[in-house]
């Protein structure tokens, strides 16, 4: 039996799509000529069936078809069919009218029945294969076309599942680079196109670079189930994307037209996580039972567009009787960004509030609009402003916006509104609990929709982050400082109290960070690093300084190395500012111009120096490297570093964080705050350098005895013969993929020069065999041109060797991030302290306690790198565990019961009596019932234990203190 793209992938998709409601016709059986885009007979039949005015006078259908033909023809003279596509979409979605009513009155023309997308529909659906289209001398043949009422809404290209040389990328490129350019009028009615080779499935819109074509994943997957691959994965995607209701949903609510930075019209289509989250929100609102939900989609994965899609769909739901949609942000820059996104998407009925009074007026009047406002404008709301049920508020960056009085005022003003929190960085701490404020108890894990960092990278929605520590060592001549200080104290007759106060202030971290000599040295390092590693890529950078004074100092130092035009400062304006800083505190229009310049690859502005502004609400895909010299925490840190993770085709493969303060522990915490479900290994550059030579050696080892100096077909035959069987070929392909990823991450570092010829040879051999089972196939399309440039010695750069760079142990970090070490350093420190404290009558543990105190003292002065702290902490943990084994310990679970008893005794009050024995026994019982070996390191195990514990505390014993829950969970994690 022969396998080819027709009888495998193409026919597989065809058979999945065709059904009782979708007819199959071969391309040559369609009622059309090969030079016609539309099936005019079905189209006219639909016009007559859907429009009473046309039904009464069927000849009017010809007038509509004439108008549609004119739009198709216009695409021939347009450089790209997006403009014509937008006009055609207005017809498809019922936004056009014609004078068909009494006395020439205009009436809406309906081409598609949207009221019955799946069942009892007036729409006629056809799936066709091998559809030929002629335009003059040009003839193209499409593998699959999905028609609705004679309109070709979807075009698909299938490649063989059994030929390793072809992937979905080739199909997408055929549509994007060939069909859309050669026969643009066929794509004027197009909602989206798709491509698949039977392993992966991607979809995109007219003009969309294929690097941005998105996958489709099922919204509900078992985390313990194996990943779906091959035709099973394609089947899932076809079921989600190509069913009639989904196609029409994409047409009506999940497609936007905008203008890019070069003033070109572009078409945007929702990614699967936006599509699914929107529909979950809409479903929840329509059901009306649950009034809130948390949407956690990682930074950079498109939350602003998600809100646009959701607003469009909610406003179209007739059941909601013209609802009010509130978009609530907590910063002016986010207001500006989101307003820009909504305006660019041409959302009707949009209002951006200028004042508290305007917001109050709109809500009191029951304005049925899409209102964008900041949370602060609720600050003076006098009680209830609007008690309607059909108000839906979407709160952006919900981890901050719900805090304090403003969030309470908003809820008081809108008592019956639906509240949906959207965030990329939820925080789960006392008084700042995103889950409590927005998560519904009915939602497993606390989320209505979640899209993790790992998922966003897997799908190409965002890029990985690489983390390069360049820690500045601060050497202090303590004796000289002490002598000078004593002299000063004597001269000024300072009291001991004065001396202590002064010395504490002088020794603060802020003073050390802002030392002029330090800033001068780091600025020089930034300039050298930027020239060698960022500028050659055609990308740009951001410097995050400690404060405004530091911003100005960095700008002055950078000017010495890069020139004044290369950088600028962006700061917010405040009362205490120096008059000299006016040029660095731009207004809204000025800031927009600066951001536009920064996003322009040709503009000389390469670096923006900031301290707070542009760490959120700043979407600049060209931003590649962030130089971090400010101690940030939690969501602020995560939001800051993820400014660099936006996709920027074709060559940007990751965002780079260069850290001058050693705050990696905080990065690790920020990325791992959801009990291991959100984390990512931040690669260490020095570690990657060490990995490259062994990786190349491993790849070359597949060719023993092959003379790599022999060129031409003789040399290629030798190489291919060494990996002739499929198993060896696939193993080589896997080895080469590791080499290519390392090479790409390190390029253009000069250390690559000595092994460039080896890499070129391996690349040539790999290109000649193209193995079939290598993951991440999109990298070929994105990196092809760059690899050729590298091979042809395009990049000649110098990188300064910084003596101040401190190398982090990437393996330790990886172990923490992947959960091999189950707790973050701070929690580990607490656990060690608690375990030592139980044995203070034992001299061994007294000594361990002294080591802990010494370790804390040294770390507090930041005279060590954070990783040194972590190393010693892990050693102390091992020694503590070893010491515990030498004493007679009760069983771990009995220790757990004792620890829980102590916890609940401590929180017991007269107002809320707790029967301690009962609650501890119950926790012990339910945890033993759901836990399994290694549960702490699996998402499913963690969720089940959390749910069981939460039900026990919250439901059975009415204990709703989150701190108690977290402490109890910690004991359960340790002892069970």
Image (cartoon, rainbow, N blue to C red):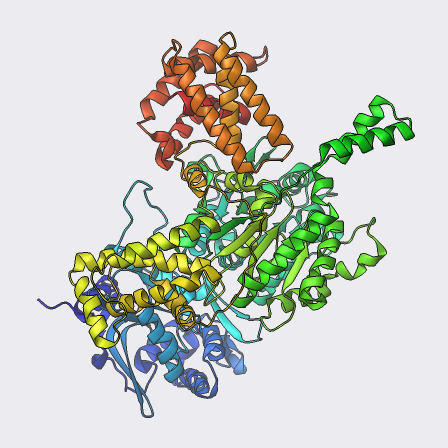
Residue name at image x 59 percent, y 30 percent? 430
Residue name at image x 84 percent, y 26 percent? 498
798 in relation to 328, above or below = below
Quarter in which the C terminus is drawn = top left
Residue name at image x 47 percent, y 18 percent? 957
Quarter in which the N terminus is drawn = bottom left
Which quarter of the figure has residue 217? Answer: bottom left
868 in relation to 309, above or below = above
Query: Residue 237 location in percent, x, y?
Result: 31, 58
Which quarter of the figure has residue 367? Answer: bottom right
Q: Nearer the viewer, residue 89 or 944?
A: 944
Q: Nearer the viewer, residue 204 or 65?
A: 204
- The tally of labels here is 0
Residue name at image x 46 percent, y 46 percent? 284
Is residue 973 left or right of 484 when viewed as pictured? Answer: left
**Which residue is at the far left?**
1
Q: Is residue 369 visible?
A: no
Q: Nearer the viewer, residue 350 or 943?
A: 943
696 in relation to 386, above or below = below
Is residue 867 left or right of 409 when viewed as pictured? Answer: left
**Which residue is at the far right?**
492
Q: Is residue 771 visible?
A: yes
Query: Residue 694 location in percent, x, y?
Result: 34, 52
Query: Residue 828 location in percent, x, y?
Result: 49, 27
Query: Residue 344 location in percent, x, y?
Result: 58, 67
Is residue 448 left or right of 852 when viewed as pictured? Answer: left
**Which residue is at the far top?**
841
């Amino acid at each position: 039996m022969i396998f080819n793209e027709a009888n495998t992938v193409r026919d597989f998709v065809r058979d999945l799509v065709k059904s009782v409601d979708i007819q199959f016709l071969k391309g040559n059986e369609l009622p059309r000529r090969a030079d016609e885009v539309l099936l005019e007979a079905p189209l006219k039949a639909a016009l007559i069936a859907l429009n009473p005015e046309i039904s009464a006078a069927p000849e009017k259908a010809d007038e509509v078809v004439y108008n549609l033909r004119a739009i198709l023809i216009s695409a021939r003279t347009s450089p790209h069919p997006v403009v014509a596509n937008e006009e055609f979409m207005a017809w498809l979605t019922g936004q056009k009218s014609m004078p068909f009513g009494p006395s020439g009155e205009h009436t809406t023309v309906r081409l598609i029945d949207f009221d019955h997308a799946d069942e009892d529909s007036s729409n006629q659906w056809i799936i066709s294969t091998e559809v030929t289209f002629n335009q003059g001398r040009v003839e193209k043949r499409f593998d699959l076309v999905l028609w609705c009422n004679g309109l070709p809404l979807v075009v698909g290209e299938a490649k063989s599942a059994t030929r390793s040389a072809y992937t979905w990328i080739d199909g997408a490129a055929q549509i994007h680079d060939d069909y859309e350019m050669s026969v643009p009028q066929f794509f004027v009615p197009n909602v989206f196109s798709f491509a698949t080779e039977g392993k992966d499935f991607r979809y995109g819109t007219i003009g969309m670079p294929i690097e941005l074509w998105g996958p489709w994943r099922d919204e509900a997957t078992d985390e313990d189930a194996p990943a779906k691959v091959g035709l099973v994965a394609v089947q899932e995607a076809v079921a989600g994307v190509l069913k009639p209701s989904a196609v029409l949903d994409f047409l009506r609510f999940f497609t936007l037209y905008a203008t890019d930075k070069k003033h070109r019209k572009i078409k945007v289509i929702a990614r699967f996580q936006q599509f699914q989250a929107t529909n979950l929100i809409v479903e929840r609102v329509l059901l009306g039972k649950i009034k809130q939900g948390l949407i956690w989609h990682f930074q950079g994965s498109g939350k602003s567009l998600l809100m646009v899609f959701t607003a469009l769909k909610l406003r179209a739901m007739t059941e909601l009787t013209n609802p009010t949609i509130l978009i609530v942000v907590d910063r002016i820059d986010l207001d500006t960004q989101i307003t820009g996104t909504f305006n660019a998407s041409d959302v009707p009925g949009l209002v951006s509030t200028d004042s508290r009074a305007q917001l109050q007026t709109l809500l009191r009047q029951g304005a049925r609009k899409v209102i964008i406002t900041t949370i602060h404008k609720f600050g003076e709301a006098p009680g209830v402003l609007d008690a309607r049920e059909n108000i839906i508020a979407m709160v952006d960056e919900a981890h901050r916006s719900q805090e304090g009085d403003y969030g309470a005022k908003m809820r008081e003003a809108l008592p019956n509104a639906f509240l949906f929190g959207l965030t990329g960085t939820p925080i789960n701490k006392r008084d700042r609990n995103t889950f409590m404020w927005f998560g519904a108890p009915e939602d497993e894990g606390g989320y209505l929709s979640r899209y993790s960092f790992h998922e966003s990278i897997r799908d190409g929605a965002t890029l990985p982050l690489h983390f390069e520590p360049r820690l500045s060592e601060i050497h202090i001549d303590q004796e000289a400082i002490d002598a000078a200080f004593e002299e000063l104290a004597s001269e000024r007759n300072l009291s001991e109290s004065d001396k202590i106060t002064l010395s504490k202030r002088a020794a603060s971290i802020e003073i050390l960070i802002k030392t002029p000599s330090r800033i001068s040295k780091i600025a020089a390092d930034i300039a050298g690093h930027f020239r060698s590693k960022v500028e050659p890529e055609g990308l740009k950078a951001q410097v995050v300084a400690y404060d405004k004074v530091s911003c100005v100092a960095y700008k002055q130092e950078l000017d010495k190395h890069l020139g004044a035009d290369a950088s600028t400062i962006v700061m917010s304006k405040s009362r205490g500012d120096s008059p000299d800083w006016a040029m660095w505190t731009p207004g809204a229009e000025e800031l927009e111009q600066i951001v536009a310049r920064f996003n322009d690859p040709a503009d000389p502005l390469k670096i923006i120096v900031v301290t707070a502004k542009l760490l959120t609400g700043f979407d600049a895909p060209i931003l590649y490297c962030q130089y971090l010299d400010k101690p940030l925490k939690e969501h602020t840190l995560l939001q800051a570093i993820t400014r660099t993770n936006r996709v920027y085709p074709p060559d940007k493969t990751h965002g780079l964080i260069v850290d001058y303060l050693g705050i990696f522990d905080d990065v690790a915490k920020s990325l791992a705050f959801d009990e291991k479900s959100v984390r990512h290994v931040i690669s260490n550059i020095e570690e990657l350098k060490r990995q490259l030579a062994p990786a190349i050696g491993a790849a070359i080892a597949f060719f023993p005895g092959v003379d790599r100096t022999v060129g031409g077909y003789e040399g290629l035959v030798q190489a291919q013969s060494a990996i002739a069987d499929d198993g060896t070929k696939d193993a080589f392909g896997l080895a080469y993929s590791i080499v290519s990823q390392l090479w790409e991450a390190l390029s253009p570092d000069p250390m690559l020069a000595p092994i460039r010829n080896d890499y070129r040879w391996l690349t040539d051999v790999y290109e000649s065999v193209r193995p079939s089972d290598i993951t991440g196939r999109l990298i070929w399309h994105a990196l092809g041109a760059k690899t050729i440039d590298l091979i042809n010695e395009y990049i000649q750069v110098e990188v300064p060797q910084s003596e101040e760079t401190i190398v982090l142990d990437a393996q330790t970090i990886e172990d923490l991030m992947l959960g091999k070490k189950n707790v973050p350093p701070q929690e580990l420190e607490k656990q060690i302290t608690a375990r030592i404290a139980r044995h203070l009558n034992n001299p061994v543990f007294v000594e361990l306690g002294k080591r802990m105190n010494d370790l804390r003292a040294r770390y507090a002065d930041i005279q060590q790198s954070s990783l040194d702290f972590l190393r010693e902490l892990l050693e102390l943990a091992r020694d503590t565990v070893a010491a515990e084994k030498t004493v007679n310990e009760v069983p771990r679970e009995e220790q757990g019961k004792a620890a829980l008893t102590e916890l609940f005794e401590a929180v017991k009050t007269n107002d809320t009596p707790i029967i301690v024995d009962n609650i501890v026994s119950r926790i012990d019982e339910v945890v033993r019932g759901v836990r399994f070996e290694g549960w702490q390191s699996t998402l499913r195990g963690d969720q089940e234990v959390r749910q069981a514990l939460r039900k026990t505390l919250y439901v059975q014993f009415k204990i709703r203190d989150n701190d108690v829950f977290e402490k109890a969970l910690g004991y359960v994690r340790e002892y069970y």
